[in-house]
């Protein structure tokens, strides 16, 4: 069996390269040839079915290039994760919509859309959102990762300042789950199973991301956290994902966000569980 590991042509960090090598190694163990294919290396016109290239049996899609993912699916290829699942996870507004009514999530208000050169010139909607969410509330750019585009607004002036900084990009406003401040659980799901989890915590920041200075601890995952993470993946149609689950007031799981291309190296270091093994096993089972 042969697969393409489709990756972004322009991101060349050690962090990403390591993930690719873990996946390649796990594939090789199962007799699967997994070729790294950079997005610019399979350039062809819309309507072409990639037969210029030697087509694989499946694609492990580790990019966020939704147009490319959709074209690969149109060409008949099975993508792990699917174009639609990657698209929903990449955009926190779409994630909130997909999870609504399926799992418990923080109350979320999606900012109305604006345009480059126009910006959020009328900010009345921010105080309207604040009256629903209360202060402080969380502002998140729709596209972001590693906690870098997530902000806490303590009052209206700070919320407006954050929105000015965001410029014209899409964002959401979210109830601050204070019972989970600075901590959450990263649950890694493959298929319909939570395969490992770690507690992430930060005493100096409300964001628990490891890249942002958070610490990690291997924990026994409460069953209701596992079910919430699996239900979130099911709602989005994911084959695998890293789900961030917060602690509600009574300690109940509140799903924060879902990552379709999880950086699982920290999880590996913390739990000893190599997600790439589970991912490749899942792919081979699905394709049998
Ligand atoms: N509504 C919220 N209430 C409390 N903490 C939050 C909330 N949303 C996010 N956080 C904290 O911020 C971190 C980053 O937010 P997240 O939505 O996961 O964005 P990113 O994609 O950047 O990781 C979370 O892991 C969590 O610790
Ligand atoms: Mg996160």
Image (cartoon, helix red, strand yellow):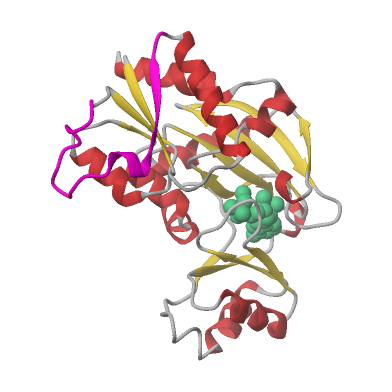
Residue 34 in magenta? yes
Describe residue 105's horizontal placement relative to residue 153 as left or right.
Answer: left
Front-most of 6 and 276? 6
Q: What residue is at 18 percent from the left and 33 percent from the top?
A: 52
Asked whether the viewer can see residue 100, the reply is: no
Quadrant of ligand 1 in image: bottom right
In this view, the residue farthest toward the right is 203
Residue 157 percent location from the top left of the image: 71, 85
Describe residue 218's horizontal placement relative to residue 58 as left or right.
Answer: right
Q: Is residue 12 above or below residue 221?
A: below
Describe residue 219's horizontal placement relative to residue 31 as left or right.
Answer: right
Q: What residue is at 86 percent from the left and 51 percent from the top?
A: 203
Q: Quadrant of residue 252?
A: top right
Residue 9 percent location from the top left of the image: 43, 44
Q: Is residue 287 above or below residue 70?
A: above
Residue 208 in magenta? no
Q: Quadrant of residue 158?
A: bottom right
Specify the segment rendered in magenta: 31-54
Which of the image's four quarters has the C terminus? Answer: top left
Q: What residue is at 44 percent from the left and 87 percent from the top?
A: 118
């Amino acid at each position: 069996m042969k697969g393409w590991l489709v990756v972004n042509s322009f991101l060349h960090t050690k962090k990403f390269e390591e993930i690719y090598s873990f996946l390649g190694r796990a594939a090789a163990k199962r007799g699967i040839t997994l070729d790294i294919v950079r997005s610019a290396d399979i350039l062809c016109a819309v309507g072409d079915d990639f037969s210029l290239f030697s087509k694989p049996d499946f694609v492990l899609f580790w990019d966020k290039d939704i147009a490319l993912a959709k074209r690969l699916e149109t060409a008949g290829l099975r993508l792990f994760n699917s174009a639609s699942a990657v698209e929903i996870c990449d955009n926190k507004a779409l994630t909130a919509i997909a999870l609504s009514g399926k799992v418990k999530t923080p109350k979320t208000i999606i900012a109305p859309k604006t345009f480059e050169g126009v910006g959020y010139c009328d900010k009345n909607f921010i105080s309207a959102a604040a009256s629903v969410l209360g202060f402080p509330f969380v502002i998140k750019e729709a596209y972001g990762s590693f906690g870098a585009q997530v902000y806490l607004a303590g009052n209206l002036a700070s919320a407006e300042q954050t929105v000015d900084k965001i410029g014209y990009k899409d964002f959401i406003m979210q109830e601050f789950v204070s019972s989970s401040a600075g901590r959450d659980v990263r649950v890694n799901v493959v298929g319909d199973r939570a395969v490992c989890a770690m507690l992430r915590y930060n005493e100096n920041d409300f964001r628990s991301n490891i890249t942002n200075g958070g610490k990690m601890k291997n924990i026994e995952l409460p069953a209701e956290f596992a079910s919430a993470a699996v239900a979130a993946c099911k709602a989005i149609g994911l084959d695998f994902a890293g789900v961030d689950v917060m602690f509600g007031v009574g300690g109940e799981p509140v799903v924060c966000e879902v990552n379709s291309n999880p950086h699982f190296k920290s999880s590996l270091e913390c739990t000893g569980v190599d997600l790439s093994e589970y991912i490749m096993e899942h792919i081979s089972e699905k394709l049998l």
